[in-house]
Image (spheres, rainbow, N blue to C red):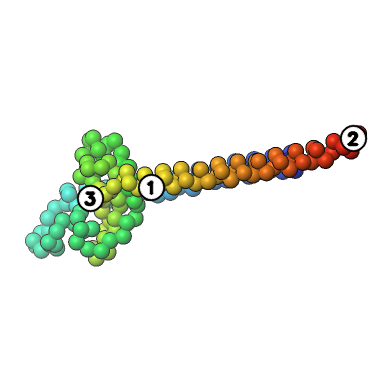
Amino acid sequence: MEYCSTKQISTFVVALIGFSVLVFFIEEYTEESEMDAEMEMKKTFYNKEHSKPAENGLEKATEYPIEECWKHEPFQVVTQCSPCKEFEIKAIKAAHCLKTGYFDRVNCSKSSTTVLRPCPSPRESRRHEFYFFYFLNSLILILSYLSTIQRKNQLDRAVYMRLPQHF
């Protein structure tokens, strides 16, 4: 901080605010697009449930429900362990939210459908994230402490060297 001018610090603060605003808008955009995808899925589900059966009686029958395609065919996880909303848990009582309160959005490869499934263990993944966060902060704490001690010793040496020059 001793070597930075006021202009450099103010530029850094303005850049930091600019990046924060940028991150805010990116987060809003991704959240909005995710909600649009979720609404599309709900519309598709509603249309399937309320559509009339085929008139000729030739519906495509599978040996398993399409909501459980992830159990019977290869899949790709699109969104991992997202929390369910209160509405889904209490009002709708969605099957994918009842077990853990979290769900995965899964894209089944063969049937090319996107379905929701209960997240197997959200607490375990959160626990690992917490330990990583704790370790990272501890490492930063140690490095900051060591750099502060080193800088303090440098400044003390500079002060001791200047003292004889004043006498």
Q: CA distance from mark 3 to mark 1?
A: 34 Å
Q: CA distance from mark 2 to mark 1?
A: 57 Å
For the C terminus, the image quarter is top right
x and y, in percent, of residue 79 in the image: 34, 52
Dot 3 falls on a residue whose secondary structure is helix
Q: Which residue is mark 1?
A: 128
Q: Which residue is mark 2?
A: 166
Front position in the image: 143 or 72: 143
Mark whose residue sits in front, 2 or 1: 2
Q: Please report contact status of discs 3 and 1: CB closer than 8 Å, yes or no.
A: no
**Residue sticking out furthest to the bottom:** 110
First in sequence, mark 2 or 1: give its number: 1
Q: Amino acid at mark 3?
A: Phe
Is any atom of residue 108 visible in this view? yes
Front position in the image: 112 or 100: 100
First in sequence, mark 2 or 3: give its number: 3
Dot 2 falls on a residue whose secondary structure is helix
**Residue sticking out furthest to the left:** 57
Q: Residues within 10 Å of mark 3 (few under 14, many from 20)?
A: some
Please identify the quarter of the rendering in which residue 12 is found.
top right
x and y, in percent, of residue 43 in the image: 26, 48
First in sequence, mark 3 or 1: give its number: 3
x and y, in percent, of residue 65 in the image: 15, 56
Is any atom of residue 37 visible in this view? no
Residue at image x 22%, y 48%? 46
Q: Amino acid at mark 1?
A: His
Q: Residues within 10 Å of mark 1 (few under 14, many from 20)?
A: few
Residue at image x 51%, y 43%? 138
Q: Relative to 167, is 117 on the left or the right?
A: left
Residue at image x 32%, y 56%? 77
Q: Amino acid at mark 2?
A: His
Q: Which residue is mark 3?
A: 45
